[in-house]
Amino acid sequence: MLSALQFGAFTFLLPVLLTALYGAGLAFYRLFLSPLAKFPGPKLAALTRKYESYYEAVRNYEYLWKIKKLHQQYGPIIRINPHEIHIDDPDFFDKLNSFQGKWNKDPFTAHQFANPHSIVGTIEHDIHRKRRMAILPFFSKQKIYALEPVIKSTVDNLCDKLENYVESGRPLNLRHAYQCFAADVVAEYCFAESGALLDQPNFASSHWNEHQKGLKDVDGPVRRMEEKKDLEFFEKAGHRTIFHELLNSDVLPPAEKGTIRIIQEAGAMVGAGGESTTQVLTALTFCLLANPDKLAKLREELRKVMPDSNSPMPTLKQLEPLPYLRGINASHVINPFFTKIGKSQPG
């Protein structure tokens, strides 16, 4: 019979032993038995995602560049973590990025923003496609043309605020200004409630954080939209809104219109739309200021539709034909925060 001391030692050592055995078994599987074991790459990357996390968290999002070096070392197809391979082969591009067939998202990537019911966090192909089809029409060219008065008024507000900084000689964090601008436009399009972040003092980033938290409130803009599904609301707003249309959509079943799901979709829409626009505008501004010849060329082209600062703001249809501006837009200015989006075929 075990003594109390021996029993205590046994109950302590057993979980440790089982954990060690599980870890050893998992490591053996990932290195030798996994379907991905045949692909070359660092053994540490095959063992654990901590290898990737080190470059993302400690080395400030450098894993993309590390992957490029790994391709130079191991070849065009490499294993970059226990569950993914990475392919650097232009002949495979069309197949990998094809809309044909079914592709599921990697749960590790899809759930990084803690909104599994949004289109960003949706893993299954069929569910993602249904949610995507419900939202896609709102980003057509005609829909953006219809939103132009909202965009122009917000641009005017941003310009007024920037002029105040110029007159006062105060330093300005342009990224925060762009963040407030983007959030106001996206939120107005989503809910007809901009949040008026541009009117907050100093474009403080804390206002953006509070705005994002407010979207998750069950009594926030989503709840107010649920209570105002009539045409009078649209007439007062002056434009259609994404989430009023979703709540009244014939494409989505009732289960897809629940408050929690719509709240998560709202957070993802404002977060993704606001942050991506902010990053592009910030990077574009830096690139133009760092290359005065490019800035001069763009200004010269813009004078065709806006001869001086007192000229009315050109319309989107006037700006679209400008070749240099269109080239900048088509270049998809490099986002400072890269990430890979893993996906797999369900089988």
Image (tube, rainbow, N blue to C red):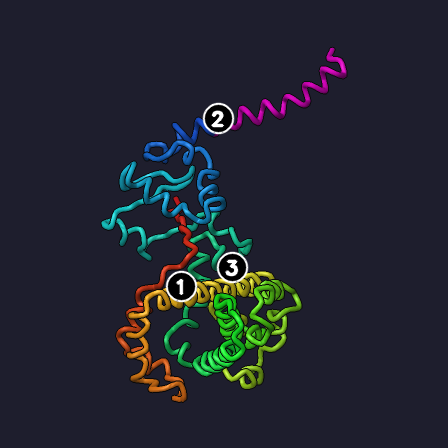
Q: Are the residues at dot 2 and dot 3 in contact (C-beta closer than 8 Å)?
A: no
Is residue 15 highlighted in magenta?
yes
Lateral position of residue 245 relative to residue 102, left or right = right
The residue segment tinted magenta is: 1-26
Q: How dense is the environment of label 2, judged by Cα within 10 Å: few (below 14), some, or many (20 and up)? A: few
| Residue 193 drawn at (x, y percent) | 57, 75
Secondary structure category for the residue under label 2: helix
Q: Residue furthest front?
A: 169
- In what quadrant of the picture does the C terminus appear? top left
Residue at 59% over, 22% down: 17
Q: Is residue 23 above or below residue 98?
A: above
Residue at 60% over, 73% down: 201
Residue at 27% over, 42% down: 76
Q: Mark 1 and mark 3: span between their CA atoms?
A: 27 Å
Which residue is label 2 attached to?
A: 25
Sequence-first tag of 1 and 3: 3
Which residue is label 1 attached to?
A: 283
Q: Residue furthest left?
A: 91
Is residue 284 highlighted in magenta?
no
Sequence-first tag of 2 and 3: 2
Secondary structure category for the residue under label 3: loop
- In what quadrant of the picture does the N terminus appear? top right
Three-letter code for the amino acid on which mark 2 is drawn: Gly
Q: Mark 1 and mark 2: span between their CA atoms?
A: 46 Å
SS assignment for the magenta stretch, majority: helix
Sequence-first tag of 1 and 2: 2
Lateral position of residue 245 relative to residue 317, left or right = right
Secondary structure category for the residue under label 1: helix
Q: Which mark is residue 118?
A: 3
Q: How dense is the environment of label 3, judged by Cα within 10 Å: few (below 14), some, or many (20 and up)? A: many
Q: Residue furthest right?
A: 4
Q: How dense is the environment of label 1, judged by Cα within 10 Å: few (below 14), some, or many (20 and up)? A: some
